[in-house]
Amino acid sequence: ADREEWARTEWPVAYGHTVGLGGLPGLVIAELLLGLQGRCQLGGTTRPELFRGLVQHARAAGVSSLFDLLATLKPRGYRQVLSTMLECIRCALSSPEQERRHDVWNLRVFGHSGELRFTKIRQSWLRETAKRWAVQDIAKRRGGQVAAAMQSRVLAVRHLSDSLYIQREDHGQDPALLGRRDIENLLHRLTYLQDTGATTARQRAHVCRDLSKIVNDIRDLGLAKSGEPAAGLPESFVIRRSDIPREAKREGPGRALPQSVMRQLYEALSRIEEISTRESRVAVELLMDTGRRPEEICRLRFDCLVTGDDGKYVLIFTDFKNNREERRLPITNITAGVIRDQQQAVRKRFPDTSTSDLPLLPRKLRNPDGTQPLTVNGLTNAHRRWVALLPPLLLPDGAEFDRTAIALYPYRHSYAQRHADAGTPADVLRDLMSHRSIATTQIYYRVTEKRVRGAVDKLVEFQFDRHGNRIWPEAKALLDHEYARMRVGSVAVPFGTCSEPSNVTAGGHACPFRFRCLGCEHFRTDPSFLPELRDYLQTLLRDRERIQAATELDSWAAAEATPSEEEISRLRALIRLTEQSVDDLTAADRAALEEATKALRKVRQTVDLGMPSVAPPHRDPRLERDS
């Protein structure tokens, strides 16, 4: 009946990959081409039939812009293509100056992924203030989790907004009328939300901490001055340090996974590749082996594996959190083998792409040339599905482990805990964990005084003097004053502890007997020092053989330098008696003793005694599988 209308809305004849754009407004045509170009730049593949159908829906609906089409478009496939195209169009048509005026920000305009929403902040002045603060803060952030971190802080502002709206007659619309009482109301409301289960103690502490920083930043940025959105905000409107509730401290290893659970996870790694991709499996394995942050593993370069001067393998990674590039981490041969196999698989998959442009773990979709790395969100989803499909994870006592505790980041805690259990010094572990402060490292493995006391109580009846006689044969647990005397009245020496007063006062640096520990009545040892005792015995035997074979020494010099037979015999007897005391225990008691030994080795301080040093015993921190 209407030929022009029919010609405008009728589906054109499909011809190969040709898509007809006739009958569409000029703006819609420009948006379609710009959106298609954006999808191509993101590495996406757009099938011609989907694009042709999207064009036809726009033609039939008679829209003047693609933004009007999303509300009426029903088919899921078309909606996915259109959503990506609209996101690309928004980026092309926007700028940071324009985006900051909206209540929902497209963070791609600011160089990040995701969105940032201010829609639920009720007061207009507070919403504008939050935006002004966010513009300043987002410029300082790096990494792939910027959207989540920023939205968490905006959520803290939303808590403040809700509190003002509910508890003030003017709903908090005038910043000049606020004061200390409003802060107290907010703190009471957060406590109420925690008591009712609407939030957690950890979230409550984070909200208070974030708001304290944001309110201080608002003043520093001058947003409380005349003419600014928070004009007149009183100085009394501030969250003090004492207002921030303390978070509960975790006892024991925190989020570290038990060794028995880690072994079972290693054995089930192949299942990840079955339900996801090879890259997901390799990423999880590297997280377990190296203790890196998820983003650091996902964004490893193809050439991340090198060999150090000592011939050992080293992993090259970027510490995105602290903005430090070319960080180096020693790794084992097994981990290096995993990386080499992955390099070969990537090269086979993308033979035409330069290795300088390739990541070690390229993602599967929207990545035609292999230059886009695996995303943390994609890896998290694959890992979550894998954990849900695992059979029950059993602890040594037969109890089932709570699988909700298994996530990507606890592998980092487990790595730190393994090294701490193996006796790695805290300053060395700080470098391994790529921390700037040793206080941060201590968060990952804390041995509380309660655990130390329990460990000492378990080992006290296994203390020996220089002759191998037990010091506390009948002791089950130390009294408080005995425990204090052991902790304060002794100092660490290479193979045990020393209670000689002048040496204790000098922190182990003033032995009046030239450090002849094995012949001194002030010397004590226990099974936790067995690795050092064995290493010292081997050192003495090697020194004796080397000196006896030397021809460049005079006889008196060789006699002075040769370890005495009395010291070697005393050391052998001490090792034998200590080992025998452990062998006589039941399996359960031996396991408890080993746990106590690990706890004490973590807090033991290394002391330079000015005597020939004994290399620390070699302990492989990767205890979950053979290295």
Image: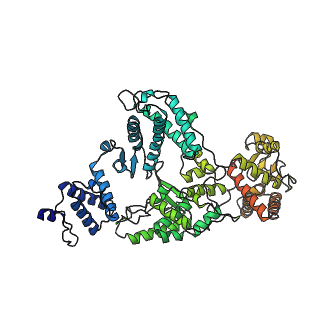
The picture places residue 276, in percent across and down from the top left corner, at 47, 68
* Residue 554 shows up from this direction: no
The picture places residue 526, in percent across and down from the top left corner, at 78, 55
Q: How is the image coloured?
A: rainbow
**Residue displayed at 48% across by 64% down:** 382
Residue at the extreme front of the image, as rendered: 1
* Residue 390 shows up from this direction: yes
Q: Nearer the viewer, residue 323 or 491?
A: 323
Q: Nearer the viewer, residue 181 or 521?
A: 181
State left or right for residue 197 relative to residue 24: right
The picture places residue 294, in percent across and down from the top left corner, at 49, 57
**Residue displayed at 46% across by 47% down:** 149
State left or right for residue 288 relative to residue 143: right
**Residue 434 higher or lower than 381, as above or below:** above
The picture places residue 328, in percent across and down from the top left corner, at 51, 56
**Residue displayed at 64% across by 60% down:** 258
Instruction: State the image quarter where residue 34 is shown.
Output: bottom left
